[in-house]
């Protein structure tokens, strides 16, 4: 064992000093305190909170969740109390309760809303970084997700970068043909890191009613079923960029997390895994420590991108030598 147990998982991710590389996936952990009855959220590396919009949103109508054989479909619709409520009520609470970095996930229907909420998030002290969700439909562009249009993905990243000095993590949509190409564009426009993948578009049909099960017809597929797709995209993107990746998509065990590190992720997020096992993050953390001990690693960073043809040496040099 070359590294002390307290140093196995320490890392710097996009300018954030973390005790470990385990975060929450936005929308799956509330505002960071809802799981306190199960474990102390300060055991995480960072808390990535529920998505925020400029205005309060009730979310989609009808059925919002559908179980699938290896995961779930969700069509919640970004239900949240809005940035005003968060700033007034939630932020002071998080300031008192959380010692780990808080990352805000921001969303908008149009470019101007992204700029507005990024400016607001910049002024909130408890928010240490911003995750820019470019999977939202752009109503000015016929409902196409910002992240599905390379030019729009680059533009929204550029405009948000202009109004915030905080670390900017751009969350990529998997519902595209060339995710690596889009990753390179948003990197060029100032992204400090990328998170991937967001949910895959899917649907379920009620065979008795002969109608779509979800009220919004389509929903986001997450859970173990998407892990092979997520791993492939993390691998592809890490071969294309020189910024760190936050990997997510079907992670529920330490073994899952290790695959993402080896594919090219520097940190990971647990999302749907919490619904099946509220202690998933704690168990993953211990599993990673055990792996470092058993494999004589000084830090988990040593296996980032190790599945690449050069054992990840080129990518690790690009992201860890800055």
Image (tube, rainbow, N blue to C red):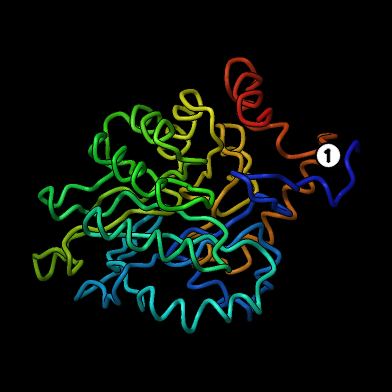
Identify the residue at horizontal 48%, vertical 36% (top origin): 231
- Residue found farthest to the top: 310
**Residue 315 in the image: x percent, y percent?**
59, 24
Identify the residue at horizontal 46%, vertical 65% (top origin): 28
Q: Nearer the viewer, residue 22 or 85?
A: 85
Q: Quadrant of the N terminus?
A: top right
- Residue 40's place in the image compared with 148, above or below, is below
**Residue 94 in the image: x percent, y percent?**
59, 76
* Mark 1 surroundings within 10 Å by alpha-carbon count, few (fewer than 14), some (14 through 19), many (20 or more): few
Q: Quadrant of residue 284?
A: bottom right
Name the secondary structure under disc 1.
helix
Q: Quadrant of residue 150?
A: top left
Q: Is residue 185 left or right of residue 271?
A: left
Q: Nearer the viewer, residue 295 or 46?
A: 46
**Residue 294 in the image: x percent, y percent?**
83, 39
Q: Nearer the viewer, residue 128 or 271?
A: 128
Identify the residue at horizontal 51%, vertical 68% (top origin): 124
Callout count: 1
Q: Quadrant of residue 304?
A: top right
**Residue 216 in the image: x percent, y percent?**
17, 65
Write down the residue under mark 1.
294
Q: Is residue 168 left or right of residue 146?
A: right
């Amino acid at each position: 064992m070359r590294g002390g147990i307290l140093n196995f998982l320490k890392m710097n991710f996009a300018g954030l000093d973390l005790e470990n590389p385990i975060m929450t996936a936005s929308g799956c952990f509330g505002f960071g305190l809802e799981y306190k009855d199960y474990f102390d959220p300060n055991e995480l590396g960072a808390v990535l909170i529920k998505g925020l919009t400029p205005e309060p949103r009730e979310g989609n109508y009808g059925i919002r969740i559908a179980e699938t054989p290896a995961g779930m479909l969700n069509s919640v619709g970004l239900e949240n109390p809005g940035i005003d409520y968060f700033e007034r009520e939630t932020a002071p609470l998080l300031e008192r309760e959380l010692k780990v970095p808080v990352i805000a996930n921001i969303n908008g229907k149009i470019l101007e809303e992204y700029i507005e909420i990024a400016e607001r998030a910049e002024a909130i002290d408890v928010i240490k970084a911003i995750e820019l969700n470019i999977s939202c439909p752009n109503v000015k562009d016929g409902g196409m997700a910002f992240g599905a249009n390379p030019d729009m993905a680059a533009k929204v990243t550029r405009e948000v970068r202009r109004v915030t000095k905080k670390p900017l993590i751009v969350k990529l949509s998997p519902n595209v043909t060339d995710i690596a190409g889009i990753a390179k564009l948003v990197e060029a426009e100032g992204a400090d890191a990328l998170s991937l993948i967001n949910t895959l578009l899917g649907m379920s049909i009620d065979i008795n009613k002969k109608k779509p099960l979800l009220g919004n017809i389509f929903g986001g597929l997450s859970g173990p079923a998407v892990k092979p797709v997520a791993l492939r995209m993390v691998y592809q993107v890490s071969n294309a960029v020189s910024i760190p990746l936050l990997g997510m998509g079907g992670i529920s065990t330490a073994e899952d997390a290790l695959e993402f590190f080896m594919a090219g992720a520097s940190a990971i997020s647990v999302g749907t895994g919490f619904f099946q096992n509220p202690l998933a993050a704690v168990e993953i953390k211990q599993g990673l420590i055990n792996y470092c001990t058993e494999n004589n690693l000084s830090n988990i960073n040593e296996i980032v991108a190790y599945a690449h043809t050069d054992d990840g040496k080129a990518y690790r040099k690009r992201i860890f030598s800055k």
